[in-house]
Image (spheres, grey):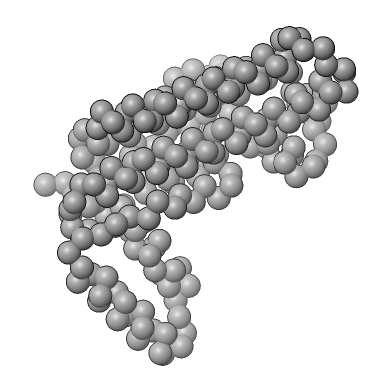
Amino acid sequence: MDDFDRALQEIIEERISVLFEIERAIFTRRYSLSSKHQDIFSTQSISMIYSLWESFIQKSFNLYIDELNNVGRDLHDFCDEIVIHHMEKSFKQFKEYPTNDNKKVRFFASLKEFHAGDSCTFSRVVNTESNVGFNVLNKLLKSFALEKFPEHWKDYAHPNPNLKESLELFLRLRNAVAHGGDLAPEDRIDQELYTRLKKLVTDLMYEIRLKMLYGLKHKTFLKSQ
């Protein structure tokens, strides 16, 4: 678990460093940017933050899945959430059941062979749906038997916007920029908003680390005895 934590902290620290450099380059007037370039780069900073955020989710869950694969347990030793996630990843037929009889027979045969195996390897593919907001994040955490985030969490509670609202704002801005839409005047990306979103991503990364460390230490991925 120590190696896991070191690797995860490296991923976090790397992203925090990049977030700091983006802010310094765009918002601190370190470079003499024209007003046009200032507007362009400040707007695109949202896409940069999101890229760092989604890549963190991908890499952190990749590391967690590697830890599960190293446990060396039978599939049915794992908790229901992980078994369901693994089965749905392995067999798309659960979401789109075949209508052809031959395909049904092949599906059943594949299931029989699958369950006859002595071990399992969980796929490292992490479906972020290209929109890691509140619901997608909690869905991923639940799939790996990790504690979900509440809507009201730490600083993200009244009188401040809650966590769900904060992530909704982040995704709304990111999607508007990514899809070429115009931002409303009140959504102008300045240093204050950048700092707010930087803090949001940083807080979430460190909390996800704690959730994963708790899951490994307490073996929440296994069935309850």
Residue 127 screen position, x and y as percent = 49, 51
Residue at x-position 54% and y-position 20%: 17
Q: Which of 110 and 8 is in front in this view?
A: 8
Residue 222 screen position, x and y as percent = 20, 47
Which quadrant would residue 41 be assigned to in this image?
top right
In the rendered structure, the answer to whether residue 150 lies left or right of residue 16 reads: left
Q: How many marks?
A: 0
Extreme residue in the left direction: 225
Which quadrant would residue 117 be assigned to in this image?
bottom left
In the rendered structure, the answer to whether residue 144 lies left or right of residue 136 reads: left
Q: Can residue 156 be seen from the camera position used here?
A: no
Extreme residue in the bottom direction: 101
Residue at x-position 80% and y-position 33%: 183
Q: Can residue 20 be seen from the camera position used here?
A: yes
Q: Which of 6 and 51 is in front in this view?
A: 6
Q: Nearer the viewer, residue 103 or 27?
A: 27
| Depicted 134 relative to depicted 209: above or below | below
Residue at x-position 44% and y-position 39%: 59
Residue 133 screen position, x and y as percent = 55, 39
Quadrant occupied by the N terminus: top left
Residue 73 screen position, x and y as percent = 17, 53
| Depicted 224 relative to depicted 148: above or below | below
| Depicted 216 relative to depicted 102: above or below | above
Residue at x-position 34% and y-position 58%: 86
